[in-house]
Image (spheres, grey):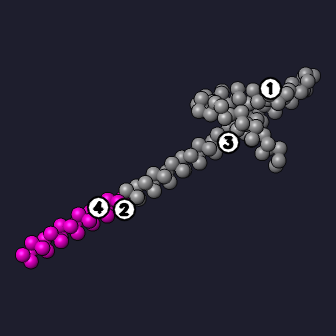
Amino acid sequence: MENTTQEIIYQFLAVGMSALFALLSLAIRKLIVNKINIEKYGFENDRIERIISNAIDFAEQKAQEYAKMGASKISGIEKLSIAREYIDKIDKSIVAKYAEQLDDMITRKIAQKWKS
């Protein structure tokens, strides 16, 4: 009787410890995956910010070229269109991924550049 009771207790402890290790492993895996996703998002976000900044600079450069040629200054909507075309040439996936938000992203970046 004593050996049977000990064996049952041992089996329950083994199952409990296995479950505990499984939960701990799952939590660690989830933490690592989240960290990787956060880093990937950060790299992607920095890349998009850099491309948008370059697009704004490109649009400003084009506006200055038109002004030097005697044309009137380009309106904000035309600059936005030029910046959008630049982004489309550099990376079409950004335009596809952020189609509706891209104009707002460019406008926000322009506001950031003018503040600094």
Give the label, 1 or 4, closer to the camera: 4
Do the numbered discs 3 and 2 sit on residues whose CB atoms are within 8 Å?
Answer: no
* Residue 24 disc label: 2
Q: What residue type is labelled 1?
A: Glu
The residue type indicated by label 4 comes to: Ala
Q: How far apart are marks 4 and 2 (CA)?
A: 9 Å
Q: Sort mark 1 into few (<14), some (14-19) or many (20+) by Cα contacts within 10 Å.
A: few
Look at discs 2 and 1 and give the one toward the viewer.
Answer: 2
x and y percentages locating residue 38 in the rendered image: 54, 50
Look at mark 1 in the image and give the residue it sits on: 78
Quick one: label 3 or label 2, which is nearer the N terminus?
Answer: 2
Q: Position of residue 64 (x, y in %)?
A: 86, 30
Give the extent of the magenta segment: 1-25
Q: In this view, does 98 lie above or below 1?
A: above
Tag 3: residue type? Answer: Glu
- Whole-angstrom CA distance, mark 1 to mark 3, is 20 Å
Q: Are marks 4 and 3 in contact (CB under 8 Å)?
A: no
Q: Which of marks 4 and 3 is nearer the N terminus?
A: 4
Of the residues tagged 1 and 3, which is closer to the observer? 1
Q: Nearer the viewer, residue 111 or 83?
A: 111
Upstream in sequence: badge 2 or badge 1: 2
> Residue most toward the left?
1
Pointer 4 residue: 19
**What residue appears at the point 14 percent right and 74 percent down from the top-left corner?**
6
> Quarter of the image holding residue 71?
top right
Please report the residue visible at 12 percent of the width from the left and 73 percent of the height from the top: 5
Assign a secondary structure to mark 2: helix
